[in-house]
Amino acid sequence: MSINATLIAQLIVFLILVWFTMKFVWPPIAKALDERAQKIADGLSAADKAKSELVAANQRVEAQLSAARTDAAQRVADAERLAQSLVEEAKTRANDEAAKIVAAARAEAEQESVKAREVLRDQVAALAVKGAEQILRREVDAGVHADLLGRLKAEL
């Protein structure tokens, strides 16, 4: 056989091999490659979707944290205002109680002063009568004595 016939036979065998490959081998390979490309595209789109969901979740978390911080700051401010109010109320009550105690002490001191004046008047009246008795060197009768004491008390 010559080189031309061998070449033609090889060309025919090659063309049959190409036809067989194109008809039976290439479509499953292309289909597998297409499926794989589709899976990769789906994975990429799922990754993009997950990334956008992650960004949205982070934004929601930040918003919730900001709201929680604001709420906590508001609660702290409310607690401070309440504490200040309680302190002011306690001061007011203490001042009122102090004023009541001072007023009671002043009233008691006034009563003691009045009692002391009465006792002093009685003593001064007794001393005045005793002095008058000694000056006169005579005894004053009980009725006159009581009358004298009454007048002295009134004058003092």
Image (cartoon, rainbow, N blue to C red):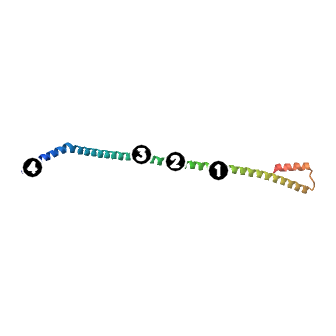
Q: Amino acid at mark 2?
A: Arg
Element under disc 2:
helix
How much space separates mark 1 and mark 2, taking CA atoms? Answer: 28 Å
Q: Do the residues bearing badges 3 and 2 touch, measured as CB atoms within 8 Å?
A: no
Residue 20 as seen in the image, left or right of residue 141: left
Compare marks 1 and 4 and give the one earlier in the sequence: 4
| Residue topped by disc 4 | 7
| Residue topped by disc 2 | 75
Q: Do the residues bearing badges 4 and 3 touch, measured as CB atoms within 8 Å?
A: no
Residue 13 as seen in the image, left or right of residue 152: left
Q: Which mark is residue 60?
A: 3
Identify which residue is drawn at 84% across, 52% down. Answer: 122
Q: Amino acid at mark 3?
A: Arg
Residue 156 as seen in the image, left or right of residue 94: right
Q: Nearer the viewer, mark 1 or mark 2?
A: 2
| Residue topped by disc 1 | 94
